[in-house]
Image (spheres, rainbow, N blue to C red):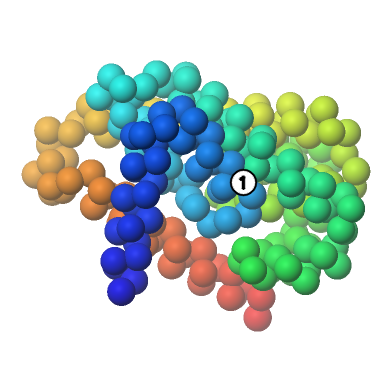
Amino acid sequence: MFEKTVAMIATWIMGTIATMGYGGVILLMGIESACIPLPSEIIMPFAGFLVFKGQMNLWGVAFSGAIGCVLGSIPAYFLGMYGGRPLVEKYGKWVLISSKDIAWADQAFDKHGEIIILIGRLLPAVRTFIAFPAGMARMNMFRFIIYTFVGSLIWCFILAFAGFKTGENWESLKLYFHQFHFIIAGGIIVFLIWYLKRHFKNEY
């Protein structure tokens, strides 16, 4: 059942990008940045694979991913600004954000200042909830968007480039994988296991 669900998610990710192109990348990365565990580590490499196939442009993919990250982060920013910690702690569990995650983000923001928003966009998992403390601290919205975009652009480019390079070596990889969705499905399984294990460890 779990494998079937993962396969469905993998198919949906690939189908969304293949059908909607850059708009699909924006949509999926927006979902990922809105604290829904849809891994960018899967989305962007597949988009990079389509770059290798000549269906998309590398910088276009990276910019689309960064735009999606900004759009998805804005709601989280405003939740932090107007709902504050009580709202995040009450509903964060529904998107697998623990109270320790928020405490860590708070401390990082207090210690390093606004630059942590840019750095946080380059860190797995952290990038998902770093917008909350920015909102709670009422960080300047313009700087929040700029830092989020720049950090996300770097992150998205690196992942897309990795997918592109994978495509370059596809002839050797196909000896081990018959279809690309097996890689996507395997990546999602690893990500979800790690994400859930990390969440429950932090929570309890």
Furthest toward the left, the residue is 175
Query: Is residue 87 rendered to the left or right of residue 57?
Result: right
Which quarter of the picture shows residue 138?
top right
Which quarter of the picture shows residue 164?
top left
Q: Residue at position x 24%, y 30% from top?
A: 167
Query: Is residue 26 rendered to the left or right of residue 128?
Result: left
Q: In the displayed structure, would residue 79 be above or below residue 196?
A: above
Q: In the displayed structure, would residue 138 be above or below residue 151?
A: below
Tell me the amino acid under the disc marked 1. Answer: Ser
| Residue on which disc 1 sits | 33
Q: Measured from the top left, where is residue 98 in percent x and y?
A: 68, 68
Query: Is residue 46 rendered to the left or right of residue 140?
Result: left
Q: Residue at position x 49%, y 52% from top?
A: 38
Q: Measured from the top left, where is residue 169 in percent x and y?
A: 20, 31
The N terminus lies in quadrant: bottom left
Q: Is residue 154 visible?
A: no
The C terminus lies in quadrant: bottom right
Furthest toward the bottom, the residue is 204
Q: In the displayed structure, would residue 191 be above or below residue 145?
A: below
> Is label 1 in a helix, a strand or a loop?
helix
Q: Residue at position x 29%, y 67% from top?
A: 3
Which quarter of the picture shows residue 92?
bottom right
Q: Measured from the top left, where is residue 40 in percent x and y?
A: 48, 44
Q: Nearer the viewer, residue 30 or 145?
A: 30
Furthest toward the front, the residue is 19
Q: Measured from the top left, where is residue 111 in percent x and y?
A: 84, 48
Q: Residue at position x 61%, y 66% from top?
A: 96
Q: Nearer the viewer, residue 15 or 181?
A: 15
Give neighbour class at mark 1: few <14, some 14-19, many 20+ (Cα, 10 Å). Answer: many
The number of numbered discs placed on residues in the rendered structure image is: 1
Q: Is residue 96 visible?
A: yes
